Image (tube, helix red, strand yellow):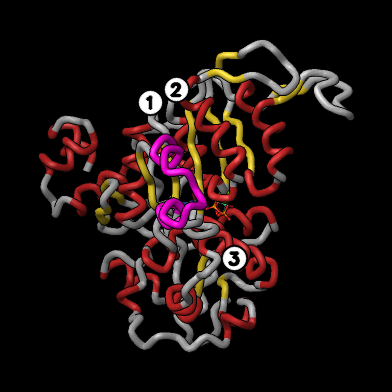
Amino acid sequence: MAKSGEKALVVMPPTTGGVQDGRKGIDEIITNSSPMAHIVEMVLRIAPSNLSILITGESGVGKQVVAEAIHTSSGRKGAFVDTHCAAFSPTLLEDELFGHEKGAFTGAITSKKGIFEKANGGTLFLDEIGEIDPTVQVKLLKVLEEKKFTPLGSDKEIKSDFRLVSATNRDLKKEVEEGRFREDLYYRINKMNLDIPPLRERKSDIVALASSFLERYSRENKKNIQGFTEETAKILLTYKWPGNIRELQNVIEASTVLADGSFITKDDLPMYLQHLDVSDNIKTEDIPIIHSDERRETIRKEDQDEPTTIINKGYETQSGRYVSIKLGTLKEMERDLIKATLDFYGGNKTQAAIALGVNRKTLANNS
Ligand SMILES: Nc1ncnc2c1ncn2[C@@H]1O[C@H](COP(=O)(O)OP(=O)(O)OP(=O)(O)O)[C@@H](O)[C@H]1O
Ligand SMILES: [Mg+2]
């Protein structure tokens, strides 16, 4: 529960990139910012092609999430096969990629399929590709050019049709300039680059992500936490998040476990965040969770125990237009949805009817 005098914020249903389109995978990418909405749009546009995609960005920004969304939106029937290149020595990585025949080397007591083969008809995701040793880089290049490969100890070439997605948190261009990464391989894996900005550069995602994690961990821990206090929200918005979304996720999970009220308060946060010097620049009206004056007034209740999802006027993001309504019976929600849509369009019945896909007369009869 928010302490007396502290303002309480209600969790906003997170905005997702792909709800409109309904594709699996993409709708797990939560975004409330235009840079991420742009990434989601690009994913949907490039997914059906065979372009090799290089995903770049700091640790924890969501490179894996985007790679999976590319696959699930691609229509490819094969598997999504991923490997963490940094986890293997050059010899073991080669074995992981190419596979081997029984007896290919001492200890090869059975044959093993390589991931080039496992990804046939699907997507091969090479994570941390910047870590690949030059001896393996040249072999990878050959496979990408020829679309076929020979497992270790075999004399048979195997054809494989996979779509390559790679990721790195290194500056690969610099690695090329400094001679650590092959230039020809760089251009082969990077037909298109998706650069995911760090969380501190897309502040409007912070509360949407935090709200989504809160909802998840609150459910998992059988708690009924409805949101963050304003003070908590300001801390979350001030902090620079060097570990990006993974760090935010950990913080919300731990805070949810600790919280014993209806809201995550400052005291529920880890010490290093409690001691953060909160920026004076962040004003209540800058907190992106709040989208309309009407909503702001309603949620500034203290000691709020009841869940208060309210109808708001709606808001617009790069990826779409949104209204939120209170969960109720179908009839109640229908009535509220019509009202919220009408409010969104400033009472313009024609526009609201178009948005709802009904004719103006039906709308008039129901509102
Ligand atoms: N837009 C998003 N919406 C929801 N969850 C996200 C989003 N982006 C990242 N996450 C979550 O944050 C965590 C880190 O994401 P992910 O593993 O994709 O990052 P990464 O860039 O691959 O990190 P690393 O560089 O450390 O490998 C995961 O638990 C993921 O589910
Ligand atoms: Mg990753």
Considering depth in this image, is 222 or 106 the residue closer to the camera? 106
Mark 1 sits on what residue? Answer: 48
Q: In the image, 328: left or right of 269?
A: left
**Left or right of residue 355: residue 2:** right
Q: Nearer the viewer, mark 3 or mark 1?
A: 1
Q: Mark 3: which amino acid?
A: Ile
Q: Residue 105's x, y, as percent? A: 83, 26
Q: Magenta stretch mostly in which secondary structure?
A: helix
Where are the magenta residues, as a range? 172-189
Rendering coords of residue 134 (x, y %): 58, 44
Q: Are marks 3 and 1 in contact (CB under 8 Å)?
A: no
Is residue 173 located in the magenta-colored stretch of the structure? yes
Q: Position of residue 180 (x, y in %)?
A: 51, 52
State which tag comes first along the sequence, 3 or 1: 1
Tag of residue 252: 3
**Contact (Cβ within 8 Å) of mark 2 with mark 1:** yes
In the image, 76 versus 139, the foreground residue is: 139
Q: Residue 307: where, in percent of width, then height? A: 50, 62
Q: Nearer the viewer, mark 2 or mark 3?
A: 2
Query: Which type of secondary structure does the marked residue at label 3 adopt?
Result: helix
| Mark 2 or mark 1: whose residue is earlier in sequence | 1
